[in-house]
Amino acid sequence: MKKRYMWKKINDFSADHLKGKLKLQSELKMPGLTIGDTCPNLDVETTQGKMKIHDYVGNGWVLLFSHPGDFTPVCTTELSKMAQYIPEFEKRGVKLLGLSCDDVQSHNDWTKDIEAYAPGCKVTYPIIADPNREVIKQLNMVDPDEKDSKGQHMPSRALHIVGPDKMIKLSFLYPATTGRNMDEVVRAIDSLQLATKHKIATPANWKPGEPVVISPSVTNEQAKEMFPNGYKTVELPSKKDYLRFVNV
Ligand code: BEZ
């Protein structure tokens, strides 16, 4: 009898635990916001006033990136780096939109630290405030493991590259413990923008100026027309001619 009671307790505990986990997941997770989805057109409060995300995107590209919290070490370095890279983003027609879950007053105070950390840089981009964690849920930016001192969920280091059609073209998702590499962000933008101009893809470790590969959907006949200066097919054991390099 005692044993049966103990098993019941264990089963109840497991069921409750599972229910709690599922509830948390459904509360937190935006249903599948990912590449190819339209970025939700949320009303957001930022350090530059209220705005609708789509109005900010306009006809350009936007980097929408979140941070776990204000006055935290890695985030401070990331926002400084973002500010230092503004000229690189501007060259590519990309605007920045940051997010951290604290309020606007806190963001404004923190901005002084961010600018002091990288002298000469100015945080000219808006930072969304999300003290109620509504925006991060909608944008799939919640870190399931990180909580603040009040037990509230915090944003992960998520980054969505939003295209002129307001769709998500690429997403990075890093945990709080790993700061992002802005060179990789710029490289990803270069790859995305090149792939909108030509039927190409960029290979591993590609850098701007290096050869790219012709998309598998392009036949050799089409490739000859599309790339009149020629392309190079790599001979492979399979004898399938799918790895075709071209300069664009
Ligand atoms: C940071 O930005 O340094 C950080 C924030 C939350 C957890 C760990 C690190």
Image: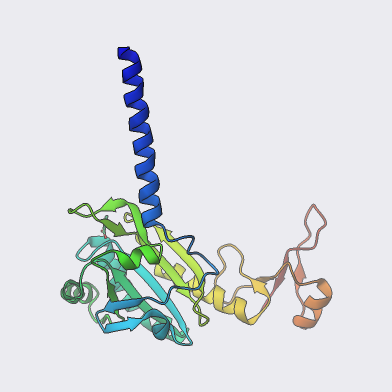
Which residue is at the far front? 1
Which picture quadrant has residue 48?
bottom left
In this view, the residue in front, 173 or 191, is 173
**Colour scheme shown:** rainbow
Residue 71's x, y, as percent?
19, 65
The picture places residue 176, in percent across and down from the top left corner, at 32, 56
Q: Is residue 23 above or below residue 194?
A: above
Q: In which quarter of the image is the N terminus?
A: top left
Q: Which of 197 and 202 is in front in this view?
A: 197
Is 149 on the left or on the right of 50, as rendered?
left
Q: Say if residue 124 shows up in the picture.
A: no
Q: How many labels does the image show?
A: 0
Q: Is residue 192 shown left or right of residue 217?
A: left
Q: Which residue is drawn at 34% across and 78% down?
A: 43
Q: In this view, does 168 lie to the left or right of 2?
A: right
Q: Which of 180 and 144 is in front in this view?
A: 144
> Which corner quadrant of the figure contains ligand 1?
bottom left
Residue extending furthest toward the top: 1
Where residue 156 sits, quadrant-wise, is: bottom left
Q: Nearer the viewer, residue 168 or 138?
A: 138
Residue 100 image position (x, y, % from top left):
28, 68
Which residue shows up at 55% across the image and 79% down it?
193
Relative to 40, 98 lies left or right = left
Residue drawn at x 22%, y 52% is 151
